[in-house]
Amino acid sequence: MMTSENTLVAEAPLCAEPEFAALLRMLVADCAPRLFALVEEAGERLDGRLFAWGMAFEDHAEVVGVDRVIRGSFESADSAQRLFSCRAKMRLVWYDPHAATQYAEADFSHTSRLTR
């Protein structure tokens, strides 16, 4: 238990370790941010380059460039996309774990581009 001074007070465990681990997994699943990417488009659908990854929380979004140079906190994923669209055509793409393709198996992750 946490006190108003943010110190732990010794109490009996809430439950056994396996149940506690399951509760923590559920807490993380319920509170997990949504993952998104900002993808820079070249031309009219000629190519796309992964520009940055982001995590959208309930009240803000965090963005990290794939080059590790760009980092930022934004009001939302949309506001990050709008800001970076000032320098290039940028598309906001929400991560879908079920959309993985053969590209992932063909070392696509190292290129971060559609074309080689």
Image (cartoon, rainbow, N blue to C red):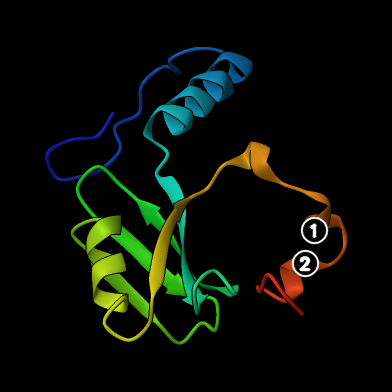
Look at the picture and state if 61 lies above or below 9. below
Residue 21 % position (x, y): 57, 24
Q: Which residue is mark 1?
A: 103
Q: In the current view of this chain or complex, which residue is farthest to the front?
A: 44
Which of the marked residues, 1 or 2, is nearer the chain's N terminus?
A: 1
Q: Residues within 10 Å of mark 1 (few under 14, many from 20)?
A: few
68 horizontally vs 110: left or right: left
- Residue 42, given in percent of the width and then of the height, sits at 52, 79
- Label 2: which secondary element: helix
**Residue pictured at 52% horizontal, 47% vertical:** 95
Amino acid at dot 1: Tyr
Q: How many marks?
A: 2
Viewer-closest of 83 and 55: 83
Residue 112, quarter of the rendered image: bottom right
How far across and down, in percent of the image, does residue 57 sit? 30, 47
Asked whether the beta carbons under mark 1 and mark 2 sit within 8 Å of each other, the answer is: yes
Q: Name the residue located 57 percent from the left edge and 42 percent from the top edge.
A: 96
Query: Residue 72 versus residue 110: which sits nearer the camera?
Result: 110
Q: Alpha-carbon distance for marks 1 and 2?
A: 5 Å
Q: Residue at x 31, y 77 (%)?
A: 84
Looking at the rendered structure, the kind of residue marked 2 is Phe
Looking at the image, which is closer to me, 34 or 108? 108
Q: Residue furthest left?
A: 4
Q: Position of residue 45 (x, y in %)?
A: 54, 69
| Left or right placement of residue 105 versus residue 51 in this view | right
What residue is shown at x 59% (from left), y 74% (from top)? 46
Task: Pick whichever, 55 or 9, lies toward us.
Answer: 55
Return the residue at label 2: 108
